[in-house]
Image (spheres, helix red, strand yellow):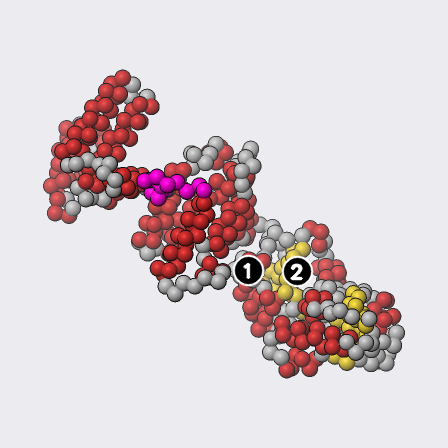
Amino acid sequence: MAVIHVVGLGPGDLSGLPMGTYQLLTSGLPVVLRTRIHPVVTQLEEQGLVFESFDDLYETVDEFQQVYFEMAQRLLAKAAQGQDFIYAVPGHPLVAEQSVQNLLQMQALGVDVKIGPGQSFLDIAAARLQIDPIDGLLLLDGTTLVDRALNPAVHLLIAQVYQQAIAAEVKLTLMEVYPDDYEITVIRAAGVTNEERIERIPLYELDRISWVDHLTTVYVPPMDEQAQRLRDLWEAVDIVARLRAPDGCPWDREQTHASLRKYVIEEAYEVAQAIDEEDEEQLADELGDLLLQVLLHAQIGREFGEFTIRDVFARLSAKLIRRHPHVFGSREAEDVMVANQLWNEVKRQERGDRSATGILANVSLSGPALMVATDVQKAAAKVGFDWKQVKDVLEKINEEMTELQEELRVDERSEAVDEELGDLLFACVNLSRFCKRDAEALLMRATQKFVKRFNWVESSVQASGKDWSAFSADRLDDLWRDAKIALRDKN
């Protein structure tokens, strides 16, 4: 069985080369380098080291992922010849070395890959920056950096920033989370005598550095100030948890799922209003308010052991994947209609045994109360459970009004008043439906009309220079009638 000894050349010159690596390199076994562009290679050559390298692949293959794949293939082909040899890479074999990872994954029968010693740039970088990784350290690849991987609460090291084009991409990605002028540190050739360079700069200058090369690493310190972390997705989660803490906000602490119900609806409507007004700034603000409701419910769920925000994310992601088999599976949807059919098909499958089979089974009870009441009545009407004429509906309204009046005379604070008032509203929805009117739209129109008339009355009161208390009820009624006349042509 051929053995591939994979060793690391350390982060810099001979002083950082592990003794175990040096002993293997000088053992007489053939040596293959991932690249000869490394400070220690010249010094090893001066000591008589003979080697071959994969530098030619960087010139002939466009994609780096393909480069590292080709390297692993060449290594396995060489091992297939039956001779042991050494594969030496910069730093440590298992730190930021995709070719080694590919080699381990593609390892074939009859080839033994042994990971040897090495020293990564992490040790020297941490020493130069005077940071302790145990405080939290995130190491990312600059060539594949995405903003969702960033965590401003911990130390961040970005490797593979080997040219200005990559530095520009790294800068733009970091700016999704960090302020443009946030101070970062650029390190080149850490630990290499006479070549090491460390410079602190504002983030926006990252791609203006002319000396960026294959030995460059970018360090981004943790954000200590809360105001700087506001763009981080988890900061809002932490703030809500703080509001619900024993020493947090009294209002937030006393909220429950039930007490927050009306605010979820209210915020959703305000989002809709911002959309209708085509106000992007307001839309972003209102979406934040709606998200607050999600975070509050998730925090309450966490406190009672029901669910956490991660459960919310997980269920949403799983549902999106399930209900889009034409995107994440083998189904096809050539248009919106088919996509909707697939969505509803999966939705029915999800319900399974939980699906009701009654007349009202397919009526959603989610939505504005007037709209839901209308849908329920329409479904019942399909099987003849409905009034025959408008006169019957009006009689029902009068009946409900009489019952409400009786309960109000007994005790206007009783639950019976709530029940009778609800019945009266439901009967009014019936009348709207019977007259082929949209109860939701009618109520909104009436509310808007009231607002206009009240604003007119308020303007009259203000124009008089008197306080509201100076106007009798009869005088206010007169102003209201005047408002109706003045605004009649506008309604």
Separation of residues labelled 1 and 2 (CA atoms): 13 Å
User: Which quadrant of the view contains residue 266?
Assistant: top left
Circles 1 and 2, Cβ within 8 Å, touching? The answer is: no
The numbered disc on residue 147 is 1
Residue wearing tag 2? 139
Closest to the observer, 210 or 102: 102
**Three-letter code for the amino acid on which mark 1 is drawn:** Asp
Identify the residue at image location x=40%, y=38%. 261
Q: Residues within 10 Å of mark 1 (few under 14, many from 20)?
A: some
Q: Is residue 205 magenta?
A: no
In the depicted structure, whether residue 371 falls above or below residue 336: above
In the depicted structure, whether residue 17 falls above or below residue 367: below
Residue 448 rendering spot, x and y as whole percentages:
23, 43
Q: Secondary structure at mark 1?
A: helix
Q: What segment is highlighted magenta in the picture?
A: 353-366
Q: Is residue 360 magenta?
A: yes
Give the mark nearer the N terminus: 1 vs 2: 2
Identify the residue at image location x=61%, y=51%. 153
In the depicted structure, whether residue 259 falls above or below residue 184: above
User: Which quadrant of the view contains residue 427?
Assistant: top left
Q: How many marks?
A: 2
- 194 horizontally vs 140: left or right: right
- 372 horizontally vs 35: left or right: left
